[in-house]
Image (tube, helix red, strand yellow):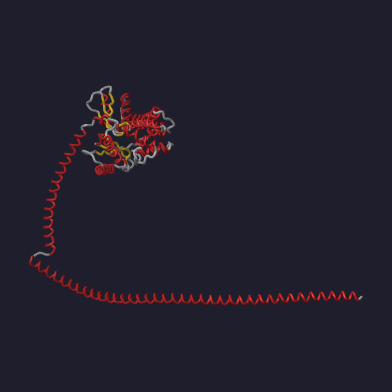
């Protein structure tokens, strides 16, 4: 029993000892924590003091900055105030000066009005005195003065007219000399005559009367429909078709040959035959284009390009047939390309098409090289071929070997002896311009330059152009020709208005 008590007392003592140790430890930790807390509070206090000092310093700096800026603003305000005061004073002075000037002007106006009144009174007195002395009224004096001025003016006008007449005579002499010189120059027209006329043989001279018709109605109808000048003279067994446009001349030639073979020549038949000849020429154009492509060994052309190629058969440039020239360029370009290792097929193709724009350059504005390039691109040609066409006259920079080859081939073909005639090209260009001027007017249906450009014959639409308007139209066209063209002699402008009424008996 006592042992148990001792054990219990020992256990209790151990527990008390452990408790005392824990309490001592707790006190030690508490003291340590209090020390750390004191240190932390001290550090916080130091930080707080530093922050307050820093805050006071910032506030002080801000205050100093604010006071400085405020002082600067006050200074600026004082300067502006001083300037405003100066301006107000200047405005006040200017206002006072304006007021003084206004008073002076007012006084001056009063003086002027007074002077005007005195002048009117003086003028009235002088008029009365003059009328009394001269024995005539103011109206009579005015009439007398006007008569005198009119007489002097007539004398001056007569002198001016005499001077103008003298100057006109001198100018007329100069112009006459120029016309004579031009006429002498035009005597040498062998090449032009060969290029702009065609002859049609007749079975007998009686056929000339049928071609002319009663009172010339057949020949007038034929010339109006074809746009050519038909020359029926004393030459036995022959009539001459004259026109600068080979296409029109070909249509007229075919039509006349058929009319002669048929012997039925009257306006209705002429119209029927000319229309049939136009369709036949279209077929000829297609055949010529296909033949040119076949001769050059080139295929896969679009039908539109074939037709344009065929049109070149009836086009000349400086007296040189354009289709023949294009074939020469294609042949030369193919040889050059083969010699230097380039694609000869493309070179031939570009050479044959290089002047294709000339087939439509009378219908589309712009250089024929660029027109041709646009057409070639539109109808599916290779970009290098298109570029060679556009660059063959340096409308674009030639930056490919193919373009340079076509340039060289074109120059070789054009430069050979006898290839081109500058005079013919200028002559044809003037005739084309003559027709273009006429067709630019409203109501004009067709226009033909005939008689070597000495006459332009214009067919108008009768629904749009009356007889009175036709007279005015001929005058306007003549004035525009005088203003825009340079030509020897004179040009006759003929406006034809034909009205037809058609009805059918059923």
Foreground residue, 72 or 354? Answer: 72
Determine if residue 279 is in view: no
Determine if residue 407 is in view: yes
Q: Left or right: where does residue 257 sit relative to residue 31?
A: left
Q: Residue at x 16, y 44 (%)?
A: 171
Q: Position of residue 143 (x, y in %)?
A: 13, 60
Most distant residue in the top direction: 203
Q: Left or right: where does residue 40 sit relative to residue 94?
A: right
Determine whether 189 is above or below 54 in the image. above
Q: Residue at x 26, y 22 (%)?
A: 204
Q: Residue at x 63, y 77 (%)?
A: 41
Foreground residue, 256 or 360? Answer: 360
Q: Position of residue 67 (x, y in %)?
A: 45, 77
The answer to which quarter of the image holds residue 74 is bottom left
Determine whether 79 is above or below 440 in the image. below
The answer to which quarter of the image holds residue 173 is top left
Q: Position of residue 475 (x, y in %)?
A: 25, 43
Q: Position of residue 291 (x, y in %)?
A: 39, 28
Foreground residue, 103 or 354? Answer: 354
């Amino acid at each position: 029993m006592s042992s148990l008590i001792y054990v219990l007392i020992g256990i209790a003592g151990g527990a008390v000892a452990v408790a005392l140790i824990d309490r001592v430890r707790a006190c030690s930790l508490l003291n340590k924590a209090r020390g750390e807390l004191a240190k932390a509070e001290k550090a916080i206090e130091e930080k707080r003091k530093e922050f307050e000092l820093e805050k006071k310093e910032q506030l002080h700096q801000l205050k100093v900055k604010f006071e400085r800026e405020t002082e600067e603003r006050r200074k600026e305000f004082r300067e502006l105030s001083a300037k405003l005061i100066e301006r107000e004073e200047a405005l006040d002075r200017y206002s006072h000066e304006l007021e003084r000037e206004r008073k002076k002007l007012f006084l001056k106006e009063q003086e002027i009005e007074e002077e005007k009144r005195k002048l009117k009174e003086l003028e009235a007195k002088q008029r009365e005195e003059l009328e009394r002395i001269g024995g005539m009224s103011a109206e009579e004096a005015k009439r007398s003065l006007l008569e005198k001025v009119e007489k002097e003016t007539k004398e001056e006008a007569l002198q001016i007219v005499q001077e103008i007449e003298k100057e006109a005579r001198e100018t007329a002499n100069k112009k006459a000399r120029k016309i004579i010189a031009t006429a002498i120059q035009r005597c040498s027209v062998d090449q032009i005559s060969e290029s702009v006329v065609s002859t049609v043989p007749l079975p007998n001279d009686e056929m000339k009367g049928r071609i002319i018709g009663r009172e010339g109605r057949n020949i007038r109808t034929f010339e109006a429909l074809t746009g050519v000048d038909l020359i029926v003279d004393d030459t036995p067994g022959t009539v001459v078709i004259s026109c600068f446009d080979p296409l029109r001349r070909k249509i007229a030639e075919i039509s006349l040959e058929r009319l002669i073979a048929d012997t039925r020549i009257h306006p209705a038949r002429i119209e029927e035959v000319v229309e049939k000849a136009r369709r036949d020429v279209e077929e000829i154009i297609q055949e010529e284009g296909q033949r040119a492509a076949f001769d050059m060994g080139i295929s896969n052309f679009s039908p539109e390009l074939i037709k344009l190629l065929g049109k070149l058969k009836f086009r000349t440039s400086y007296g040189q047939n354009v289709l023949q020239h294009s074939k020469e360029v294609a042949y030369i370009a193919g040889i050059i390309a083969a010699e230097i290792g380039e694609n000869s097929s493309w070179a031939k193709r570009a050479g044959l098409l290089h002047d294709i724009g000339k087939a439509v350059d009378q219908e589309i504005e712009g250089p024929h090289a660029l027109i041709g390039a646009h057409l070639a691109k539109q109808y599916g040609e290779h970009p290098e071929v298109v570029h060679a066409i556009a660059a063959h006259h340096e409308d674009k920079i030639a930056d490919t070997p193919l373009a340079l080859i076509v340039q060289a081939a074109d120059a070789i073909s054009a430069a050979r002896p006898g290839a081109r005639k500058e005079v013919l090209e200028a002559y044809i260009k003037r005739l084309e311009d003559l027709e273009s001027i006429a067709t630019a007017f409203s109501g004009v249906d067709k226009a033909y330059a005939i008689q070597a450009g000495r006459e332009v014959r214009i067919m108008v639409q009768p629904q749009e152009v009356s007889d009175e308007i036709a007279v005015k139209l001929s005058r306007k066209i003549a004035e525009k020709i005088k203003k825009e063209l340079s030509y020897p002699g004179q040009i006759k402008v003929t406006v034809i208005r034909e009205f037809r009424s058609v009805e059918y008996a059923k």
